[in-house]
Image (cartoon, rainbow, N blue to C red):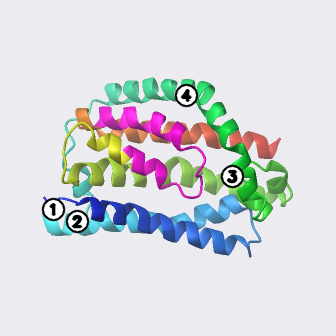
Amino acid sequence: MNRITIKKLLLYILFPTAILSLSYLILGHFCQMPYILLFCLIGTVTLVPAELGIILSASKKEFGSYSLKSALSEQGRVSIWKTLLFAFLFFSLAGLWSVFVAPLENKLLEPLRQALLSRLPAGFDWQNIDYIKSFSRPVILITCIYYGLFNVIIGPVTEELFFRGYLTSHFRIQNGFTPILIAILFSLYHFWLPFNNIFRILVFAPVAYVAYKKKNIYISMCFHCMCNLFSVIGFVLEVVR
């Protein structure tokens, strides 16, 4: 197995997300669609291929063929009901963090957030529902559908294979802190959502640790999909009512 150094770890994580974020920032100034749809489209053609490409390339070197084996080779036998049970337990814990931690973090960073958004077009504020509602009904429908596909399936599955699968198992230092470190870096790599890092770390670090110890990436994958599904449902209900 080819072990990843800290320098390569940072390169693998930060370079793709920097390309995505820079592309989003530039194209957003010329955007004629909801910015959240623009982001999902850019992510589909930049971040997803980059992360999967790293896994495929590593699998070719390790196993002789392009596959996802490098992300899944360290996984043990999977019990479906235990996987879902753990995912639901951590989803419930995330709900508590969303009630007691997220509002405090949002309140603390709100002045900084508003200062940044005041210098950008209105569409960069994904909480600006009136902006999204200003588009035609078909555009809103397309936005909801693709945002759901990307945010509930494409994005989280790719990220879990990359972060909890490949990076965690291949990092050169293997101990109980490894999944925590990867979870912290995972939170910080969300350049496009920079004001929720405390909440994200508290949400993803525990499930990343358990997934690592249980050798069951599907715990964090199911959990990640659940969390994103919850946010997508809230978004859709806001924009269609």
Residue sitting at 66 percent across and 61 percent down? Answer: 37
Q: Secondary structure at mark 2?
A: helix
Specify start and end residues of the magenta stretch as a single range.
Answer: 183-211
Residue sitting at 23 percent across and 60 percent down? Answer: 5
Q: Is residue 211 left or right of residue 223?
A: left
Query: Residue 11 location, x and y as percent?
Result: 35, 66
Tell me the crowding category of disc 2: few under 14, some 14 to 19, or many 20 or more residues within 10 angstroms, Cα based: many
If you read the primary sequence from the N terminus, does the residue marked by circle 2 or circle 3 appear first?
2
> In the image shown, does 107 or 231 lie closer to the viewer?
107
The disc labelled 1 sits on which kind of residue? Answer: Asn
Residue highlighted by disc 3: 144
If you read the primary sequence from the N terminus, does the residue marked by circle 1 or circle 4 appear first?
1
Q: Is residue 45 visible?
A: no
If you read the primary sequence from the N terminus, does the residue marked by circle 3 or circle 4 appear first?
4
The disc labelled 2 sits on which kind of residue? Answer: Ala
> In the image shown, does 133 or 183 lie closer to the viewer?
183
Q: What label sits on residue 58 in the rendered view?
A: 2
Calculate the distance from the C-alpha at mark 4 to the C-alpha at mark 2.
36 Å
